[in-house]
Image: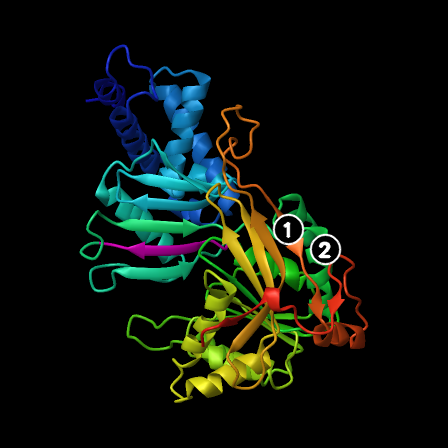
Amino acid sequence: MSLRSRVAATQPQGTAPGTDPSRDDSLVAVYRAKLLEEIDLAEMSSLQAADRRLRLERVLGHIISREGPVLSSTERTQLIRRVVDEALGLGILEPLLADASVTEIMVNGPDSIFVERAGRVEQLPLRFASAEQLMQTIERIVSTVNRRVDESNPMVDARLPTGERVNVIIPPLALTGATLTIRRFPRAYSLTELIELGSLDEHMLMLLAACVRARFNIIVSGGTGSGKTTLLNALSALIPPHERIITIEDSAELQLQQDHVIRLESRPPNVEGKGQVTIRDLVRNSLRMRPDRIIVGEVRGGETLDMLQAMSTGHDGSLATVHANTAEDALTRLQTLGSMSEVDVPFEALRDQINSAVDVIVQLTRHADGSRRITEIALLVSHGREQFTINTVTRFAAQPFVPTGLGPDATGQDRRVHGFYEHLPLPRRVADRLYVAGESVPPGFGVVEVADVRNTREATG
């Protein structure tokens, strides 16, 4: 049977291309096979990625012109793109990776694909032709980072050369089919841009800038997807350009703009279970590299103790992030993580370390409408082995949703979270530390001689 006959057999009469997914998959499979028959693999391997794609598109265009079927210019373009994506890229995921508005791609088996846009998750009318095609795509992804995925190694967590973070888990662990999660990281936002997005206001910018320049140790806390890395990136831009900065991450995401930056990334074990380099190994090594500042993308284990010791023994001005839902939870989590070290440190001693090391906690929250904003800036004002005591200097006061029946302009009717930032006085001890460093207290805050009891609370620890 000729190619034209085979294509015609897959195309139901009266059905326009692009309206029947199964037929589209058949067309793509037929033309992908024909494309592979006509290209010179040796020639293709010598071309750059962009030239390789152009070459395939040109060859496929000739095949379609020569053998049909008759398609409109739009249908022809779509078919060529899908076939080349299958042959060269990641198939139906390619357009999603090219879409700058997509921040997360979630494939839950071959028939279920979700994406996150602007903080909202939505399901797409896309699917893989089969479970085998999904596995081929997954294998192509993990092979770019010299990893493999199979029944003996069913979970992979890696970073692509282009920066995306990828997690894969396959059957038998994933009961709904092979699951692929690709997290894309947006460009680096400045603090001014974050103000325009409503993540903070100008008074908070002035306070955070003063704290960074005065070498306060800052912990950025928040839940998954709350914008911790984005804020950490923005805060790092306030570090003076002459300082030596060492960044330590599980998957390299930070995009610092200074000249004197050393980027370190942990390494998982190889297929033999050897060669692992942990965040803790990197934190310990960084102390021998004469850093002015250490930035840890996320503390999640025993490295927390090393980070706290570094912060309290001469490496002021360091920054780190931690997963927690409140400022109090962040302190408790730091204490718990520090206890995961192989060194048996009593909780009281860990509390002493945290009180000595941490100066500021910046709490981020992802709201129901998808917006991300700083909901609290708190100062740790306890000493020694005292119970954690934090003094809130900024909080976001969300306005409650009150249905009024007045239409979309009424409070809350636009489905957005509304509210305002409340700024409270800084304790005298903190203000004096800013003055000594040559910084001033932002006018929106003011100073009190003793921490305001109304804004001070103890955290369990």
Q: Which residue is under mark 2?
A: 203
| Residue located beneath label 1 in the image | 421
Magenta stretch, residue numbers: 163-170
Where does the image place residue 75, in percent across and percent down from the top left?
Answer: 41, 21
Left-right relation of 46 to 449:
left
Marks 1,2: beta carbons within 8 A:
yes
Q: Is residue 164 magenta?
A: yes
User: What residue is shown at x 65% (from left), y 78% (from top)?
Assistant: 316
Is 274 on the left-hand or right-hand side of 357? Answer: left
Foreground residue among 197 and 89: 197
Compared to 268, does 140 lie above or below?
A: above
User: Residue 100: where, in percent of width, then height?
Assistant: 53, 41
Q: Residue furthest front?
A: 453
Q: Is residue 111 left or right of residue 411?
A: left
Q: Which mark is residue 251?
A: none
The answer to whether residue 79 is seen in the rendering is yes
Q: Is residue 277 visible?
A: no
Give 355 or 69, whichever is nearer the viewer.
355
Q: Residues within 10 Å of mark 1 (few under 14, many from 20)?
A: some
Q: Residues within 10 Å of mark 2 (few under 14, many from 20)?
A: some
Residue 357 lies left or right of residue 137; in this view the side is right
Q: Quadrant of the C terminus?
A: bottom left
Quarter holding the N terminus? top left
